[in-house]
Amino acid sequence: MQKYFFLTSAIAFLFTTQTIANTLCQRQISCPLGYNQCPQINVSLIYCEQRSSFYWGSNQVITCDVCPSGFLRVQKSVLAPGCSNEVTYYECQEPCTGCNNCVSDTDWSEPILNTGVQQKATRKCVCNTCNATYEYRCVPGYYGSPTGTGISDTICTSCPSQGTSAAASKYITQCYEPTGTTHNDNSGTFSWTNNCYYSGS
C-alpha cells in the first residue's frame, strides 16, 4: 500500500509539473505575479510612435500600436516561458530602400599615417545600413600583423636600414636588402649579387 502511495504521488507530481510547463496562456491586462513582477520577453521596440503592454502568462509583452509615417507595422510571434502557445505582438520596421555608395574596395588604401598599414574594406548593404569589415596588411618595406590603424592597435614595423619587403610581410625574415645593395667595410666596398634576407637574430 505504501509503495502504491509513493508511485501515485510521483505520477501526480510529474503530471503537475508538465501541466505548469505547458500552460495554455491567454492575454491579460495585469501581471498575475503582482505589480512590476512579470519579466519582459521582447526587447524594447525602436521606431515605435505609440506602444502598449499586456501580459501573457507571467510575462510582459510590449507591442507597437502606431508606427511613424512610412514605416511598416509587422506582426511577430514568440514562445513565452511557461506557455505552450505563442504570443503575437507588433513592431515597426523601416522600409528597405537600399544603401548609397556601399561598394567594397577593389584595391588597398594608401599607407595610413606613419603606421606602414594599408586597409581594404568589404562592404555589404543590409536593408538601409552599409556594414563594412576591414582587412589590414603591411606596405612594402614593413612587416607585422596589423590589427588596425588606431593608437591601441598593432601596427607594422619598418624593415632595417636599406631593407625592404613585399606587401603583407609578417616577419623580419621576409625583409631583405635587394640585389646590388652596397656596403663598405675594412676590406673595401662590396654589393649583394642576390637578395640578402635578414636572419631575425
Image (cartoon, rainbow, N blue to C red):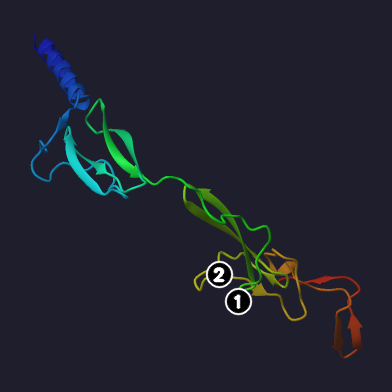
Q: Given the current orientation, which residue lies at the most extreme bottom position? A: 186
Answer whether labels 1 and 2 touch (C-beta < 8 Å): yes
Residue in the picture at 32% in, 35% down:
76
What numbered label is drawn on residue 21?
Answer: none
Along the horizontal axis of the image, is 201 left or right of 136?
A: right
Camera-nearest residue between 84 and 65:
65
Residue in the picture at 24% in, 33% down:
81
Residue 84 spot, x, y in % from top left: 25, 25
Along the horizontal axis of the image, is 200 left or right of 66?
A: right
The amino acid beneath tag 2 is Thr
What numbered label is drawn on residue 149?
Answer: 2
The mark nearer the N terminus, 1 or 2, is: 1
SS state under label 2: loop
- How far separated are the C-alphas under marks 1 and 2? 9 Å
Camera-nearest residue between 68 and 146:
68
Residue in the picture at 17% in, 36% down:
55
Along the horizontal axis of the image, is 40 left or right of 157?
A: left
Where does label 1 land, which residue?
Answer: 113
Along the horizontal axis of the image, is 62 left or right of 168?
A: left
Mark 2 nearby-residue class (10 Å; few <14, some 14–19, many ≥20): many
